[in-house]
């Protein structure tokens, strides 16, 4: 009955949004409370789970999303995004701009957490689409596919890094294998799949639609790239330094602080306030007005993500993930496929890629302790499964839907299907790599 109750809760969520036209935030709250009752959480603990889920998810994301929106708005308003878009178009040409987006997402996504990369790079997608009148989804999906793959497959992202430690895998070897599998996966789920999405209607948020400026009013190419990509520079730099330092070194905690995604985004925003703002003759009041406008536009996105966090927490507190894993662990199949399948099912039911991956790790570890499977490939199989079919209980689903302003149906046809392609092709890559090795 547990799975049936989960499906009922998700069905109610979909009906409230699609049929009743209820605001997604309110729909999430109602569905979360319903799920709590159906799954047997004590009545006095349901509200606690809802509040905990909202707070924990927003606590991780609010600084990143808000400062990222401010930086994105400034990159657009200052003309930096126009300069970057023109530079990419000169190299790749309009015909291959979606390949340029894929390369950008992959390079930036290796050191950058998914949510940071999303709010940082999506304004660039919108600038390209408005300036050259290209379909937003067609241009954006290759970039988002690259960000998603790096998030699920490659250390130092949270889930793969934790799985490496749990299975005592080699971090460097996992990264090498992950890169080998990631490239064809991104090509198939990105530029190839995007060819079928040109007719999807999307009206991206106006906050990232900057007016085209004359060439002489634009910041230099160096200033544009430096200011927009400073978060990447800081994250890569602090990560490399942290790897070189002994945990007992006096500067180790300092580097951990400076390498935190929220701190990186704050520093980057302050630097861009000067390089793209004051230095380009913006007044401080005008800059603050830009930041206020950016915050207004993403307020509802924050609430929707908080609602997704509430549902996720209720499902976790009810023990759904453990129930599913226990029911599947005795299945007679290849360990890599079993690990992928358990992760995929938990992911679809719970919504969190990280929770799905780490939950599976605890279950699958005893099965593979005999050394019959390569631990690096196991990390990647679980990483692929953790990206399977993102839908209404996943914060990433709503980030995409609200930023690109597409319907629920088209979000599933584009975003959810892209994530599913990544999961399936990723598993195929793992199995092929196992044969080769």
Image: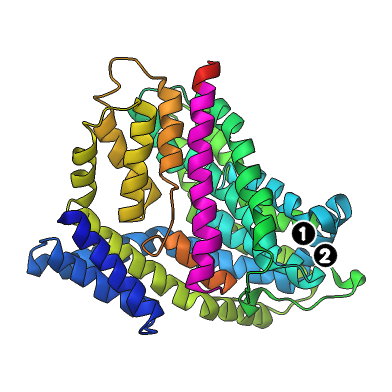
Residue 70 point in image, percent of width and height: 59, 70
Residue appearing at x 8%, y 69% in the figure: 43
What colour scheme does the image use? rainbow
Residue 130 point in image, percent of width and height: 75, 72
In this rendering, is residue 208 above or below 240?
Answer: below
Q: CA distance from mark 2 to mark 1?
A: 6 Å
In this rendering, is residue 217 above or below 4?
Answer: below
Task: Please say if the residues under marks 2 and 1 sit with CB atoms less than 8 Å apart.
Answer: yes
Q: How busy is the neighbourhood of tag 1: few (under 14 within 10 Å), some, or many (20 plus)?
A: many
In this rendering, is residue 12 above or below 168?
Answer: below
Residue appearing at x 59%, y 50% in the figure: 145
Foreground of the two, 235 or 118: 118
- The span picked out in magenta is 406-433
Foreground of the two, 56 or 257: 56
Residue appearing at x 14%, y 61% in the figure: 39
Residue 56 point in image, percent of width and height: 32, 60
431 within the magenta span: yes
Q: Which residue is mark 1?
A: 224
Q: Which mark is residue 219?
A: 2
Task: State whether residue 113 appears in this view.
Answer: no
* Circle 1 SS class: helix
Residue 142 point in image, percent of width and height: 65, 52
In the image, is 421 to the left or to the right of 372? right
* Circle 2 SS class: loop
Task: State whether residue 45 appears in this view.
Answer: yes
How many numbered circles are shown? 2
SS majority, magenta: helix
Residue appearing at x 37%, y 22% in the figure: 168
Task: Identify the residue at the far right of this view.
Answer: 216
């Amino acid at each position: 009955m547990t799975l049936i109750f989960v499906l009922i809760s998700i069905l109610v969520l979909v009906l409230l949004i699609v049929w009743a036209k209820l605001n997604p935030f309110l729909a999430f709250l109602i569905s979360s409370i319903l799920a709590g009752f159906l799954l047997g959480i004590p009545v006095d603990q349901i509200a606690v789970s809802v509040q905990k889920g909202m707070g924990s998810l927003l606590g991780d994301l609010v600084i990143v999303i808000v400062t990222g929106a401010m930086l994105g708005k400034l990159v657009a308003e200052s003309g930096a995004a126009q300069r970057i878009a023109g530079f990419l178009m000169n190299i790749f040409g309009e015909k291959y701009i979606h390949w340029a987006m894929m390369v950008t997402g992959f390079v930036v996504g290796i050191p950058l957490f998914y949510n940071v990369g999303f709010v940082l790079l999506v304004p660039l997608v919108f600038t390209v689409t408005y300036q050259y009148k290209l379909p937003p989804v067609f241009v954006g999906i290759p970039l988002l596919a690259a960000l998603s793959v790096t998030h699920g497959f490659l250390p130092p992202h949270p889930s793969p890094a934790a799985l490496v430690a749990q299975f005592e895998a080699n971090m460097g070897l996992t990264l090498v294998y992950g890169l080998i599998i990631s490239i064809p996966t991104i090509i198939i789920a990105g530029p190839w799949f995007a060819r079928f999405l040109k007719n999807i209607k999307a009206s991206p948020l106006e906050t990232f639609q900057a007016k085209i400026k004359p060439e002489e009013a634009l910041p230099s190419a160096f200033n544009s790239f430096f200011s927009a990509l400073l978060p990447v520079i800081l994250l890569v730099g602090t990560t490399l330094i942290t790897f070189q330092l002994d945990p007992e070194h006096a500067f180790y905690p300092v580097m951990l602080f400076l390498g935190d995604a929220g701190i990186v985004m704050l520093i980057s925003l302050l630097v861009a306030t000067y390089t793209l703002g004051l230095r380009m003759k913006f007044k401080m009041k005008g800059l603050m007005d830009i930041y206020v406008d950016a915050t207004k536009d993403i307020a509802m996105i924050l609430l929707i993500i908080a609602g997704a966090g509430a549902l996720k927490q209720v499902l976790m507190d009810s023990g759904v993930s453990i129930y599913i894993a226990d029911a599947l662990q005795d299945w007679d199949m290849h360990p890599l496929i079993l690990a992928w399948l358990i992760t995929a099912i938990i992911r679809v039911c719970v919504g969190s890629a990280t929770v799905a991956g780490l939950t599976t790790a605890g279950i699958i570890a005893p099965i593979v302790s005999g050394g019959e499977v390569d631990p690096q490939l196991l990390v990647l199989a679980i990483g692929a499964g953790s990206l399977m079919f993102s839908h209404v209980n996943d914060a990433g689903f709503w980030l995409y839907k609200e930023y690109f302003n597409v319907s629920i149906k088209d979000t599933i046809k584009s975003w959810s299907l892209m994530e599913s392609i990544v999961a399936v092709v990723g598993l195929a890559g793992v199995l092929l790599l196992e044969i080769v090795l």
